[in-house]
Image (cartoon, grey):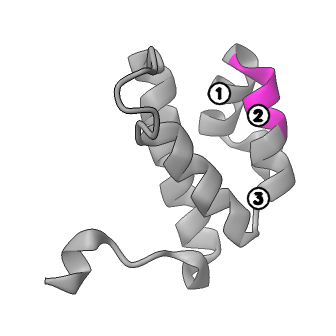
Amino acid sequence: MLKKNIHFNTIHSAFPHIGDRLELFWGHPEFVNYVDNLIYDTRDGGRKGFPPEIFMALHQLSEDHFEVFPHLRKLAKDDFF
C-alpha cells in the first residue's frame, strides 16, 4: 500500500533515505516519532527545513498512517487542556 501512496512517493523521490525509514517504520509506533522529529524542529532552529511540498507530503502521510493505524495516534498537546 505504501508504495502506491502519492505522499510517500513524493518524499521518497526527493529524499530516498527518509523514504526508506518511513517504509521500515510504517505501521509501528516508531513511525509517529520519526515523522514528528522530521516535521518539528528539534535542533533549536538549526535546521534548514524541507521544501513546502515535502513538508506537506510528510503531514499528509502522517494523516494517512493514522487512518490505517488509528491506535497509534498520539495525544496532541491541545488534548491536555
Give the answer, above or below, for where 4 lies relative to 48.
below
- At a point 45% along the width and 44% down the height, the residue shown is 59
Kindly report the secondary structure that dominates the magenta region of the rendered protein: helix
Q: In this figure, which residue is indicated by the disc labeled 3?
A: 26
Relative placement, left or right, of 39 versus 33 is left
Of marks 3 and 1, which one's residue comes earlier in the chain?
A: 1
**Cα–Cα span, label 1 and label 2:** 6 Å
Q: Residue 40 carries which label?
A: none
Circles 2 and 3: CB atoms closer than 8 Å: no
Which residue range is magenta in the image?
15-20
Q: In this figure, which residue is indicated by the disc labeled 1?
A: 11
Q: Residues within 10 Å of mark 2 (few under 14, many from 20)?
A: some
Q: How crowded is mark 3: few (under 14 residues within 10 Å), some or many (20 or more)?
A: some
Residue 25 on image: x %, y %: 79, 57
- At a point 45% along the width and 21% down the height, the residue shown is 47
- At a point 68% along the width and 42% down the height, the residue shown is 5
Which amino acid type is shown beneath numbered disc 1? Ile
Relative placement, left or right, of 44 versus 59 is left
Asked whether residue 53 is drawn in magenta, I would say no
Residue 13 sits in which quadrant?
Answer: top right
Give the answer, above or below, for where 27 lies relative to 35.
below
Q: In this figure, which residue is indicated by the disc labeled 2?
A: 19
Relative placement, left or right, of 33 versus 22 is left
Numbered-mark total? 3
